[in-house]
């Protein structure tokens, strides 16, 4: 099978897969099978020796319904394992479908949802934003910014920022209607994430 590109990140070399994925909003299922024993299972052991990945791909793993398998491999403990996830948040769903192999041609997440995801990642990587900075916007600034771009998508006769635009004019960068809606969607996602983090902190402090 095609392993999700997310697992190519070096972070997965440092921490257990489950502990790494869960903070992103995934419910994780990991199933194990032992490597075939050359004495008790000579044919299977031979098949594994000839082409380990083909053998691993031929195995069947029983994950819960609605889970998507994202990885198969073997480890140093002589185990073959399979990882499957269920996205519990919008961010996790977008992250899952960022790998095109997991966002099929018929999926509603491709390409419109993916455009929002990539815009959110662009904001975090190239625009100087961060989740820590987002947490400072406690007066609905992100929501107002999203509403501004959504409004602009239907009001293309002017490039002037709406009155509710929360930041300096230099940060107002309207484009075509679809691009404006993508920016609005990414800002809505940022605000939802901020609210979820704030709620989690309040719950942790209780």
Image (spheres, rainbow, N blue to C red):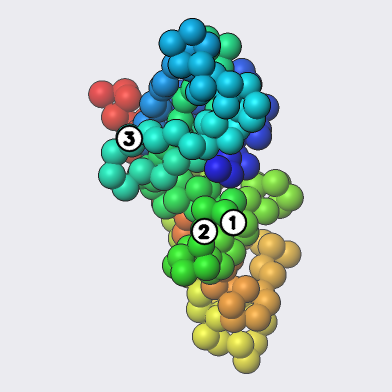
Confirm or deny contact between disc 2 and disc 1 (CB under 8 A): yes
Q: Nearer the viewer, mark 3 or mark 1?
A: 3
Q: Considering depth in this image, is 194 or 81 the residue closer to the camera?
A: 81
Crowding at dot 2, Cα within 10 Å, few <14 / some 14-19 / many 20+, comes out as some
Calculate the distance from the C-alpha at mark 3 to the C-alpha at mark 1: 24 Å
Q: Which residue is mark 1?
A: 100
Calculate the distance from the C-alpha at mark 2 to the C-alpha at mark 1: 5 Å
Q: Considering depth in this image, is 21 or 177 the residue closer to the camera?
A: 21
Crowding at dot 1, Cα within 10 Å, few <14 / some 14-19 / many 20+, comes out as some
Q: Considering depth in this image, is 131 or 31 the residue closer to the camera?
A: 31
Of pointers 3 and 1, the one earlier in the residue sequence: 3
Residue 141, above or below 137: below
Q: Which residue is mark 3?
A: 62
Split into 4 quadrants, where in the image is the C terminus? top left
Split into 4 quadrants, where in the image is the N terminus? top right
Confirm or deny contact between disc 2 and disc 3 (CB under 8 A): no
Crowding at dot 3, Cα within 10 Å, few <14 / some 14-19 / many 20+, comes out as few
Q: Considering depth in this image, is 161 or 132 the residue closer to the camera?
A: 132
Q: Secondary structure at mark 1?
A: helix
Q: Which residue is mark 2?
A: 103
């Amino acid at each position: 099978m095609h392993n999700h590109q997310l697992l190519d990140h070096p972070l997965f070399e440092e921490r257990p897969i489950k502990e790494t994925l869960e903070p992103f909003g995934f419910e994780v299922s990991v199933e194990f099978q032992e490597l075939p024993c050359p004495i008790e299972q000579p044919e299977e052991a031979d098949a594994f020796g000839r082409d380990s990945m083909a053998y691993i791909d031929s195995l069947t793993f029983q994950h819960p319904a609605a889970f998507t398998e994202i990885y198969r491999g073997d480890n140093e403990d002589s185990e073959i394992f399979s990882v499957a996830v269920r996205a519990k948040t919008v961010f996790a769903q977008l992250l899952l479908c960022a790998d095109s192999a997991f966002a099929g041609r018929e999926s509603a997440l491709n390409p419109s949802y993916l455009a929002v995801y990539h815009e959110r990642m662009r904001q975090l990587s190239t625009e100087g934003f961060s989740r820590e900075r987002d947490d400072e916007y406690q007066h609905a600034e992100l929501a107002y910014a999203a509403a501004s771009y959504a409004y602009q998508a239907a009001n293309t006769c002017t490039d002037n920022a709406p009155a509710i635009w929360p930041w300096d004019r230099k940060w107002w960068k309207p484009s075509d209607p679809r691009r404006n809606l993508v920016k609005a969607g990414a800002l809505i996602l940022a605000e939802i994430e901020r609210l979820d983090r704030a709620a989690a902190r309040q719950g942790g402090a209780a």
